[in-house]
Image: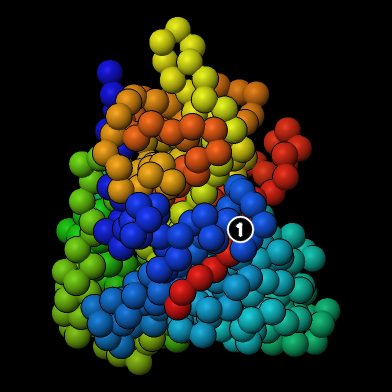
Amino acid sequence: MTKPMGPIPARYAAGKDGTLHVAGRSVAALVAEAGGTPLFVYDLAAVAAQIRRFRSAFPGVQLHYAIKANSYANLLSFIESKVDGLDIASAGEMEAALAVAAADRISFAGPGKTDAELEAAVRAGVTLNIESEAEAERALAAAGRLGVTPRLAVRVNPDFELRGSGMRMGGGARPFGVDAEHVPALVRRLRGGGADWRGFHIFAGSQALSADALIEAQRATVALAAELAKAAGAPPRLVNLGGGFGIPYFHGEQPLDVEAVGAALGKILAARPAILADSVFAIELGRWLVGEAGVYVTRIVDRKVSRGKVFLVTDGGMHHQLAASGNFGQVVRRNYPVAVASRFAAGPDERVSVVGCLCTPLDRLADDVLMPRAEAGDLVAVFLAGAYGLSASPQAFLGHPPAREIAVGG
């Protein structure tokens, strides 16, 4: 039985030669330029289009890029020039961010920050999103040793979650953020300890496709920020509303109505409580900005038939694109959009499974899908590969070489 695939983004089309083109260039030419496969191709024009769409839908709201989605240097430099801030979650990401952005445009979230990370962030002037009372004390101690004023915000674990989100980050007991009821006292401690208190980071969930769910979460977030500010006796300079904007990976999923979310947020902010009157609001996005801009290109090295079932074995796999293999949060495995890039204009001829080169049955890029007949040497494209590709995959597994990356267009 064949299984459906998710939708290929409309921007991708066949050239006159019938092969897949990205930013007006054939993938074969891009592979040759990059030096071979496996290869991630990032269409910068697609990223720019998403940023323009956000600006139109959310006037007056800052846009931050969560670089955990994709920290490829050329892509990161391109995005940094078009957004208002970068959000990071490790010392390695901080190094990448500082290479392209000023420290006051960077915020550092994530549980389990080491003393060395806290000290490096304080020394550089990066804003730390504090995840616990103990982390707050360690950050203040680091600032004391260095003799500088630390930039500290509080990440809040809200008492609600983002309905229908692919990954829930708030509500209930969580390793992320400070429980809302403890936040006012912590804000007073930070301010009393001499910190430059920057505001709140409130993130309830990710990969949401429901505009209604996001609107509900944003309304609750603004209300919570006002309540916490009143209890702490201090208005926040910045309220990071989190992100959570999803993209449709799988069959039957519909794109998020971003314009509806933006219109609703505009009304929410227009009626916000007085204590937030001078606060700046930001939305932190990763996947929604870069996910559809990426294509993972891998070459078929073997066409194998086993008991009547066709397997296209590629030189890539889950060590580069874990999410497409179904091993990054899926409960029931579903297919990302996949195509034979060498015959992109052709109709389907047969049912196949596309598998990688690793010695594990988990290494499957497409399962029982209809595709044009392909042979060894043909190129396969996995779409929606711009976010959580290399940044979320076990690249060292079995010692295969890393994938190449290239940014085009823009």
Nearer to me, 200 or 309: 309
Q: Can residue 284 be seen in this view?
A: no
Q: Measured along the vertical axis of the image, is residue 202 above or below residue 28?
A: below
**What is the count of numbered marks?**
1
Amino acid at the residue labelled 1 = Ala
Q: Position of 68 compared to 380: left or right? A: right
Q: Measured along the vertical axis of the image, is residue 270 above or below residue 156?
A: below
Q: Which residue is drawn at 33% across and 56% down?
A: 14
Q: Position of residue 320 (x, y in %)?
A: 59, 45
Position of the C terminus by quadrant: bottom left
Location of residue 218 (image quadrant)? bottom left
Q: Position of residue 372 (x, y in %)?
A: 34, 35
Tell me the element at label 1: helix
Location of residue 206 (image quadrant)? bottom left
Q: Residue at x 71, y 72 (%)?
A: 95
Position of the N terminus by quadrant: top left
Q: Residue furthest front?
A: 17
Nearer to me, 104 or 348: 348
Q: Residue at x 71, y 65 (%)?
A: 91
Q: Residue furthest top?
A: 307
Q: Residue at x 68, y 79 (%)?
A: 98
Q: Residue furthest right?
A: 145
The colour scheme is rainbow
Q: Can residue 101 be seen in this view?
A: yes
Q: Where is residue 151 in the image (x, y as percent from the top left)?
A: 62, 82
Q: Name the residue under label 1.
A: 32
Label 1 neighbour load within 10 Å: few <14, some 14-19, many 20+: few
